[in-house]
Amino acid sequence: MRRRLDGATAVVTGATSGIGLATSRLLADHGCRVVLVGRDQVALRRAARQTGGVECLVDLTSPDAADTVVRAAGGQVDLLVNNAGVGWAGPLEAMPADQLGSLVEINLVAPLRLTRAVLPRMLARGDGHLVLVSSIAGYMGVAGEAVYAATKAGLRAFADSLRLEAADRGIGVSLIVPGAVDTNFFRRRGQPYSRRLPRMASADAVAREVLHAVQRDTAEVFVPRWLRLPARLRGAVPRAVDVLQRRLG
Ligand SMILES: NC(=O)c1ccc[n+]([C@@H]2O[C@H](COP(=O)([O-])OP(=O)(O)OC[C@H]3O[C@@H](n4cnc5c(N)ncnc54)[C@H](OP(=O)(O)O)[C@@H]3O)[C@@H](O)[C@H]2O)c1
């Protein structure tokens, strides 16, 4: 059965840029009332103009962020896209402790809190969909991105557990697993993308996969799709894949 989006209230975090902005536009095109969450006031206003959506200016690491978002949505959220996130690249021992804390807060704690805040109403109605934007780093591990990878693996475990917990109560849970995406992500983290593979996908391509995952209630989507193979191999033969990863950089 395809989930109807027309008239649904969708909250998208990180809606000011990249994957979140592309997803917000697509959801608006499909009839959703989009609640756009971000910190950049100018970009948020622009996104609201483009989508006809509701602005929710909030730092998701603040303690009352989840309440602020639910209030902006008017209480009821039909679809939550937990997308906001940041990267950090470098050896673990060089990572400042405060940056470690804020990376975990924004990438992992904030989606957990926000999901916890919207879930009771979804369960009461027996209907709702949760999207978590993870990363291939959460499957494979990436040298120089240990904390980032840990946050994204955390989202995966959260999604798997929540799906078991809530599936037969009408709640869909989709994990989106992008490889590299052409957004501001790399500029923000201060280190450009340098690998040959996977090639960069566009934010629009990821947004389309988010839409399909929601419509079809797909548990897990890799972008590009072939990334599913190394991810599965990593689970089956971890040592061999570690050796391969080290060789390929
Ligand atoms: N780009 C990639 O290669 C890639 C690959 C795999 C997974 N991902 C994941 O995809 C998601 C979206 O990233 P992107 O590539 O679209 O990057 P992006 O263009 O840099 O967008 C990041 C978004 O997160 C928001 N954000 C960051 N910190 C926030 C905070 N404390 N409170 C509220 N919003 C915050 C930003 O909003 P403001 O600017 O308004 O603060 C921005 O809208 C992230 O979770 C990222 O880990 C990206």
Image (cartoon, grey):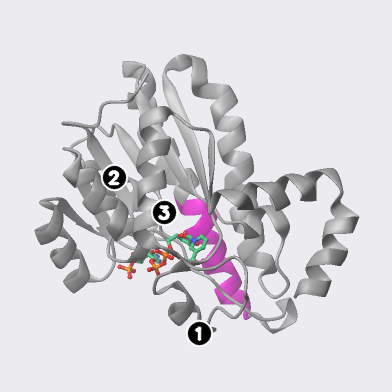
**Which residue is rendered at x = 83% and y = 73% of the image?**
247
**Magenta highlight on residue 102:** yes
Identify the amino acid type marked 2.
Answer: Val
Q: Which residue is mark 2?
A: 11
Q: Which residues are magenta?
A: 96-110
Q: Which mark is residue 190?
A: 1
- Label 2 or label 3, whichever lies nearer to me, is 3
**Amino acid tagged 3:** Val
Q: Residue at x 52, y 68 (%)?
A: 102
**Disc 2 packing (10 Å; few <14; some 14–19; many ≥20):** many
Which residue matches tag 3? 206
The amino acid type found where label 1 is placed reads Gly
- Secondary structure at badge 1 equals loop
Return the x and y of residue 64 as percentages of the image width and height: 34, 52
Coordinates of residue 118 in the picture (x, y in percent): 36, 35
Dot 1 or dot 3, earlier in sequence:
1
- Is ligand 1 closer than 8 angstroms to the Cβ of mark 3? yes
What distance separates the C-alpha of mark 2 from that of mark 1? 28 Å
